[in-house]
Amino acid sequence: MLLREVKSVFHRELDASYGRDEVNSFFGMLIEQHLNLQRFVLALTPELTIDKESETFFFQALSRLRLHEPIQYILGSTHFMDLEFLVNEHVLIPRPETEDLVRWILSETSRLNDQLSNGEPIKILDLGTGSGCIAIALAKHLPRTMVYGIDVSKKALEMAKKNAKRNGVKVTFFEQDIFKLQLEDHFDIIVSNPPYVRESEKEGMNANVLQNEPEMALFVPDGNPLLFYRAIAEFAVERLKPFGSLFFEINQYLAVETEQLLHDHNFSEIEHRKDLFGNDRMLKGTFTRPD
C-alpha cells in the first residue's frame, strides 16, 4: 500500500477530532519511529510503499488515536529536556511547562558551588517522581549531585528506573507514600509536581487526558485541593538543610493559596513564576532552620 494513501486515511478519519496540522504531526512521528524515516521523505517520494506489517502498525495506531489515546503512549516514548523518556498508562506524560521548573532549579544551583568544591554532594529529592523526568533531567545536568525519587506507584517506579538507565544517570528511587514519608536524610532541594487538578476542573480537560492518564497522579478533591502541598511542606520543614529550597509545580488557579501555605510553614524568599503559556505555574520557597 502507498504510504500517502495511509496518510489520506488518517486525515479522513481524524481531522474532525484533531485538526489537519495535528494529524500531520501524528503521522510524521509514526513514520519517524516505525519506518526510521524523516517525515519530509514522503513528500519527496510520493510512490513510497509499505509492507503488510507496517500497514498493521499504522492502522492500529489509527484505531488508538480514534479512541483519543495520547500519541506518546502509542509511540511508547516522549522527549523532555532533550532526553527521551519511556511512557505508558502508569505515568503522566511529561509536559513542556515542567521543563521550565527544571530549568529554574538548574539556574538556582549555582549558589551551591561552594558546597560542591568542598566535596559535599548536593542532595535533591523529587516527590511523586512518576516517569522520573524531573529527577533524571536534574541528574543528567548536575552529574555531581545525589538525586532521589519517590512515588507510591510501583508501576511508575519501574518506568522511572528504566528511564534512568536509558539516559545514563544514577537516581535512587523509593516506593513511599507522600503522606507517610520515612526518610532520614536532609536535602538541599526538594521538588514536586504533585496532583493538583480539582475534580471540578475535569470538564475543561481534553478527553485524551481524562481517559488515559493515571487519575491518582492528576486529581485532588475540591474540598482539600492542597493536601499534597501541605504534606510536602511539613516534610520539607523537617528535612531541608538550612537555606534549602522547596520547588513546586502548582495549579494556576490556586497560586495565592499555595503561596500562603508556604508562608504558614515559615518559608521565606517566596517566588512564583509563570510557564510558557503565561500561567502561574511554579513556586519556590527557602527554609531557614531556626537555631
Image (cartoon, grey):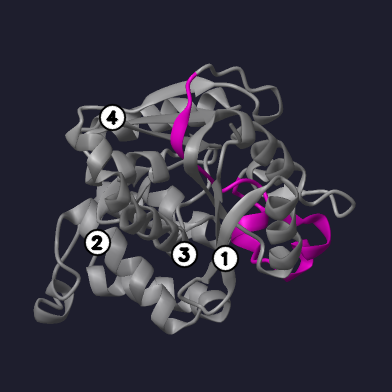
On screen, residue 278 above or below 201: below
Label 3 neighbour load within 10 Å: few <14, some 14-19, many 20+: some
Residue at the spot x=78%, y=67% of the render?
Answer: 203
Circle 4: residue type: Pro
Do the CB atoms of the residues marked 1 and 3 lie less than 8 Å apart? yes
277 sits to left or right of 38: right
- Quadrant assignment, res 127: top right
The residue where tag 2 is placed is: 31
Circle 3: residue type: Glu
Q: How far apart in space, not on screen, are marks 4 and 2 (Cα)?
A: 43 Å
Circle 1: residue type: Arg
Q: Is residue 51 visible?
A: no
- Compare marks 1 and 2 and give the one earlier in the sequence: 2
The residue where tag 4 is placed is: 121
Which one is closest to the eye, mark 3 or mark 4?
4
Q: How far apart in space, not on screen, are marks 3 and 4 (Cα)?
A: 28 Å
- Compare marks 1 and 4 and give the one earlier in the sequence: 4
Label 4 neighbour load within 10 Å: few <14, some 14-19, many 20+: some
Q: How far apart in space, not on screen, are marks 3 and 2 (Cα)?
A: 27 Å
Which one is closest to the eye, mark 3 or mark 2?
3
237 sits to left or right of 146: right
- Compare marks 4 and 2 and give the one earlier in the sequence: 2
Residue that lies at the very extreme toward the right in this rendered image: 223
Please provide percent x and percent y for residue 272.
56, 66
On screen, residue 26 above or below 234: below
Q: Which mark is residue 97?
A: 3
- Compare marks 3 and 4 and give the one earlier in the sequence: 3
Please provide percent x and percent y for residue 201.
77, 64
Do the CB atoms of the residues marked 3 and 4 lie less than 8 Å apart? no
Quadrant where the N terminus is found in the figure: bottom left
Highlighted magenta segment, given as a residue range: 185-213
